Image (spheres, rainbow, N blue to C red):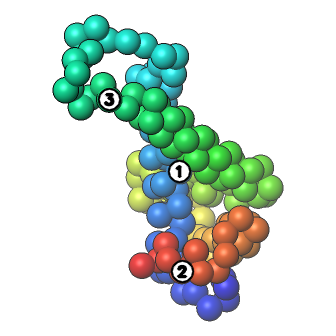
Amino acid sequence: MEKELTLKQKDKLAKKIYKSYQRAQLDILYLSQHYNYYPQIDIFKVKEGDTNYQKPDAMILQQMERKQELENFVSMINQIHSHMSKESYSFIESEYLNFYNPDWWIPYFSRASYYRLKHKVLDELIEYTQSFWTSDDLRRLLK
């Protein structure tokens, strides 16, 4: 699939993956800090007609499933990172994870070297993501 995508499409795909990755990490942190998964009873909410108290088990179960899905996604991306070369991961880190300065590459690479490395890194990323997602899943991310 990586051969039929332009650099712009590959970049868009990588940005969406890493935006979802960072969002998942924040959501896991939020869920870990704000939800206690032990059964609790709030005596101020225990009323016969109160809708907030009618299905607390379903809400807890839903939050636990959501947290598990997020943890699976984060571990999948971390596994992809562990298989990438050190040079590729440092590029990903500078370009997508710690994106503070769009011109971070100027002291390190010429323009041609930067784009050559970007092509190589994005091809490697897409190759590893295809072991987890199908080509159709990746195309859906491009929309």
Q: Residues within 10 Å of mark 1 (few under 14, many from 20)?
A: many
Which residue corresponds to mark 2? 139
For the residues bearing labels 1 and 2, Cβ distance under 8 angstroms: no
Q: Position of residue 28 (x, y in %)?
A: 51, 35
The residue at the far bottom in this view is 4
Callout 1 touching callout 3 (CB < 8 Å): no
Q: As drawn, is 137 to the left or to the right of 75?
A: left
Pick whichever, 94 or 1, lies toward us: 1
The residue positioned 46% from the left and 55% from the top of the image is: 19
Identify the residue position indicated by label 1 in the image: 21
Three-letter amino acid code at disc 3?
A: Gln
Residue 7 vertical placement versus 30 (above, below): below
Where is residue 36 shown, x and y percent of the image?
47, 19
The numbered mark, 1 or 3, whose residue comes first in the sequence reads 1
Label 3 neighbour load within 10 Å: few <14, some 14-19, many 20+: few
The location of residue 8, given as percent across then percent down, is: 48, 80
Can I make out residue 25 in this image? Answer: no
Instruction: Give me the disc on residue 54.
Output: 3
Question: Split into 4 quadrants, where in the image is the N terminus?
Answer: bottom right
- Distance Cα–Cα, label 3 vs label 2: 41 Å
Query: Is residue 22 visible to the viewer in this orientation of the structure?
Result: yes
- Which comes before the other along the chain, label 3 or label 2? 3
The quadrant holding residue 49 is top left
**Which kind of residue does numbered mark 1 sit on?**
Tyr
Instruction: Name the element at disc 2.
Output: helix
